Image (cartoon, rainbow, N blue to C red):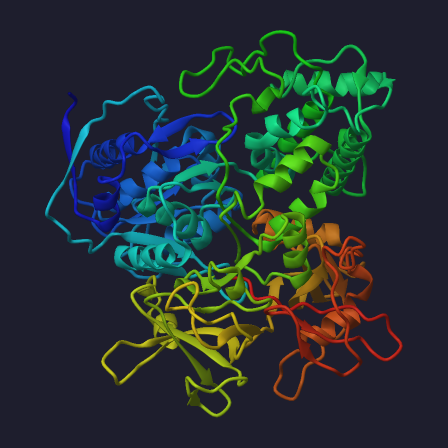
């Protein structure tokens, strides 16, 4: 019997200790490596003690501990070990450029930076290029940041049934323990949102009551882990419930479909032909021989992605289409990075970590398309299979040989993911396409949730059609409060464009900011700012008391202040059966509908020596929901020749995360404002970006179709989406003003 370990009596640790120790807590989709609940708490203890030894301390209560760890079991252990030490867990985003990470580390006054071997070079860059002064202006503050590389946990394997004993002590003091996430920084410098352990627990318990997580659930995790959605909804809450979390990151639509389909492929294949042999429908194209393609795949193999192809390759129409799509995306990425001055071969290409990762994924996708059927074992990258869930890859399916055949019952992602899945489903091989439809049907996928941005109703309806009846569940939340509102589990409680009712334990009120008065709780169809309170609400913006005070409204009822979300909503009566309590007593009465941000204009002066003034806007995109557009007024004395999108990208690439860099640019002489000095974003989008709409806002398959309205007619469509035409004679296109939380 191994050593006895101890953890404080935090709610999560206490519950995990009572889960079945032999049930799977965490698994990795592609490799198949799996970790049981019985080994989770011991590993948390060992990781916490490792922190103590590395720092030479036995108490790091309340200290900010930043970490860069990939989506994996190691991330979960690291995160919970920091909580166990009663410290503040500060997850960092790997794609962020060094200056943004440096800002977060200094503003948070982090004392530790933990990292896995995968991000050693990233940490080295952050520490070696630290030239900006600390944003923390307190005279007594001195940076004592210590970096520590974490060991990789390989796990005990599925056959192990003996685990270290962990004692849950009577010490239930959680003060100092929590998580800190940083806001996006679109309107000001990013703020650190301090969420104490008691708020994390309250958020998780509310979701368990509303969404009914159970030990039978298996959640496919496709989300980044420096956001509230990926951590609370998809890690902490399933761990509270004893569910299984399966990591598959970064998101790849074809791989997600393959994972959905995997439990049902054999039955679909058996039903494909009378004698039970796999169907060949849709895969009857002739052989082709392409030397350049063979060379490309051979080159990919040299980086560990595939088996070299020296002969002919059988390609179906869908395979050919997939190759063309990959080629176009690769060419576009390399061309953008290389710029107009020359080819990549002559000018060199500088790629962000995000772009590099995407190219690696595309190369892997390409190798799967042209991979010949193996007749013997395929060599692992290191030549040796791992004993925890990694086989020899000899089965047809290549990299999917170790993929689980347990069905996915719980899926929670952003609207863009559903759009991508709907689009990619059309080009899947018939067997995977059909098995995927079975997998996402209500019979097998218990709940599919959309959040973090407004869900276009056409996407919701298209998913229902594809899944043969599974209605996406919408909810509303933000970093400062976790999830606050949600539609119910009963399909009748999932009304288009609504985000439902306050979750258990959450108080909601609407405040009319024009009249500065409370909207009575029985009043419907009147817009007001959403204000919240409850145990789920964050404590403060770190080291920013002015910002904290600004966002809270004192109350005289002794129940604590109200948090001002800045989002506008209204309550509306909805037809039965919605609101009848079928999903629980919390899901009754009028439902909430998000209308948008109270102040949606984002405009800043300066930002670079070339720029006198800039406005950042959301340009409609059917593929992405929105893409970022920039309208700038230039200083012609510095750049008399103008500014092109590539110039902007080069100027921002080392300073901003890739997703924050505008994708479309317009240079203007004047940015119009109203009498109050504000700009009208919707009008500006129509005036400036008419030629930059993707063209995929209107899709023939009804995936992203939007309704149009007459000139001058403002109307509310999907949650957070407002439509308005350009003018009487212009082609009418929607303006999206989506809430992104």
Front residue of this view, candidates 75 and 284: 284
Work out which residue is located at the far right of the displayed protein and give it. Answer: 729
Image position, residue 332 (x, y; %): 76, 40
Image position, residue 564 (x, y; %): 42, 75
**Total marks in image:** 0
Image position, residue 203 (x, y; %): 35, 58
Q: Residue at x 72, y 52 (%)?
A: 647
Front residue of this view, candidates 544 and 481: 481
Work out which residue is located at the far bottom of the displayed protein and give it. Answer: 515
Q: Residue at x 66, y 12 (%)?
A: 374
Work out which residue is located at the far left of the displayed protein and give it. Answer: 170
Examine the image and state in which quarter residue 398 appears.
top right
Quadrant placement of the N terminus: top left
Determine whether 369 is above or below 232 in the image.
above
Work out which residue is located at the far front of the displayed protein and give it. Answer: 274
Examine the image and state in which quarter residue 387 appears.
top left
Q: Residue at x 66, y 26 (%)?
A: 269
Image position, residue 33 (x, y; %): 43, 25
Front residue of this view, candidates 27 and 692: 27
Residue 132 seen by the camera = no
Q: Residue at x 33, y 19 (%)?
A: 159
Residue 273 seen by the camera = yes
């Amino acid at each position: 019997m191994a050593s006895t370990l101890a953890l404080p009596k935090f709610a999560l640790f206490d519950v995990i200790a009572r889960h079945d120790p032999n049930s799977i807590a965490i698994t990795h989709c592609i490799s198949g490596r799996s970790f049981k609940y019985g080994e989770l708490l011991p590993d948390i203890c060992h990781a916490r003690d490792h922190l103590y030894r590395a720092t030479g301390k036995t108490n790091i209560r309340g200290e900010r501990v930043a970490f860069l760890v990939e989506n994996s079991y190691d991330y979960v252990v690291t995160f919970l070990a920091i909580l166990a030490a009663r410290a503040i867990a500060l997850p960092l985003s790997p794609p962020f450029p060094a200056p943004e990470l440096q800002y977060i580390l200094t503003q948070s006054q982090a004392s530790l930076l933990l990292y896995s071997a995968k991000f050693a070079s990233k940490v080295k860059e952050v520490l070696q290029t630290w030239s900006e002064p600390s944003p923390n202006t307190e005279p007594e503050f001195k940076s004592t940041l210590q970096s520590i590389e974490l060991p990789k946990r390989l796990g005990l394997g599925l056959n192990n049934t003996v685990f270290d004993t962990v004692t849950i002590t009577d010490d239930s003091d959680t003060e100092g323990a929590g998580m800190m996430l940083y806001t996006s920084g679109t309107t000001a410098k990013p703020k650190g949102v301090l969420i104490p352990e008691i708020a994390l627990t309250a958020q998780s318990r509310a979701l368990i009551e509303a969404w009914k997580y159970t030990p039978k659930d298996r959640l496919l995790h496709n989300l980044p882990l420096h956001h509230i959605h990926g951590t609370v909804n998809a890690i902490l809450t399933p761990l509270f419930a004893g569910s299984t979390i399966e990591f598959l990151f970064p998101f790849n639509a074809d791989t997600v479909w393959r994972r959905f389909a995997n439990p049902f492929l054999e039955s679909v294949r058996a039903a494909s032909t009378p004698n039970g042999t796999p169907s060949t429908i849709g895969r009857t194209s002739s052989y082709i021989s392409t030397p350049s393609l063979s060379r490309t795949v051979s080159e990919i193999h040299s980086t560990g992605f595939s088996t070299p192809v020296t002969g002919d390759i059988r390609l179906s129409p869908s395979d050919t289409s997939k190759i063309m799509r990959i080629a176009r995306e690769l060419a576009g990425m390399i061309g953008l990075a290389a710029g107009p001055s020359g080819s990549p071969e002559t000018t060199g290409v500088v790629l962000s970590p995000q772009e590099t990762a995407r190219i690696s994924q595309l190369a892997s996708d390409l190798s799967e398309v042209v991979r010949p059927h193996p007749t013997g074992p395929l060599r692992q990258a290191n030549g040796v299979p791992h004993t925890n869930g990694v086989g020899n890859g000899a089965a047809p399916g290549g990299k999917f040989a170790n993929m689980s055949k347990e069905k996915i019952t719980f899926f929670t992602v952003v609207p863009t993911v559903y759009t991508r899945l709907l689009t990619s489903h059309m080009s899947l091989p018939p067997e995977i396409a059909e098995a995927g439809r079975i997998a996402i049907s209500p019979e097998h996928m218990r709940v599919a949730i959309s959040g973090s941005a407004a869900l276009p109703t056409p996407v919701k309806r298209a998913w229902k059609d594809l899944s043969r009846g599974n209605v996406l569940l919408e909810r509303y939340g933000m970093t400062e409060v976790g999830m606050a509102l949600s539609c119910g589990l009963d399909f009748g409680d999932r009304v288009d464009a609504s985000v439902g009712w306050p979750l258990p334990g959450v108080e909601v009120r609407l405040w009319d900011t024009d009249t500065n008065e409370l909207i009575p709780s029985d009043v419907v169809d009147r817009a007001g700012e959403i204000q919240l309170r409850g145990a789920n609400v964050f404590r403060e913006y770190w080291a920013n008391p002015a910002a904290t005070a600004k966002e809270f409204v004192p109350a005289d009822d002794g129940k604590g202040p109200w948090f001002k979300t800045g989002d506008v909503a209204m309550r509306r009566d909805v037809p039965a059966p919605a609101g009848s309590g079928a999903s629980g007593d919390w899901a009754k009465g009028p439902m909430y509908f998000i209308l948008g941000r109270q102040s949606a204009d984002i405009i800043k002066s300066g930002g670079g020596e070339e720029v006198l003034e800039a406005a950042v806007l959301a340009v409609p995109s059917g593929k992405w929901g929105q893409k970022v557009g920039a309208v700038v007024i230039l200083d012609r004395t510095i750049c008399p020749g103008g500014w092109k999108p590539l110039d902007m990208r080069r100027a921002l690439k080392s300073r901003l995360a890739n997703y924050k860099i505008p994708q479309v640019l317009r240079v203007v002489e004047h940015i119009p404002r109203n009498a109050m000095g504000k700009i009208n974003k919707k009008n500006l989008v129509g005036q400036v970006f008419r030629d930059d709409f993707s063209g995929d806002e209107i899709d023939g398959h009804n995936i992203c179709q939007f309704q149009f309205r007459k000139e001058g007619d403002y109307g509310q469509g999907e949650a957070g989406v407002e439509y308005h035409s350009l003018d009487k004679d212009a082609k009418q296109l929607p303006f999206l003003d989506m809430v992104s939380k």
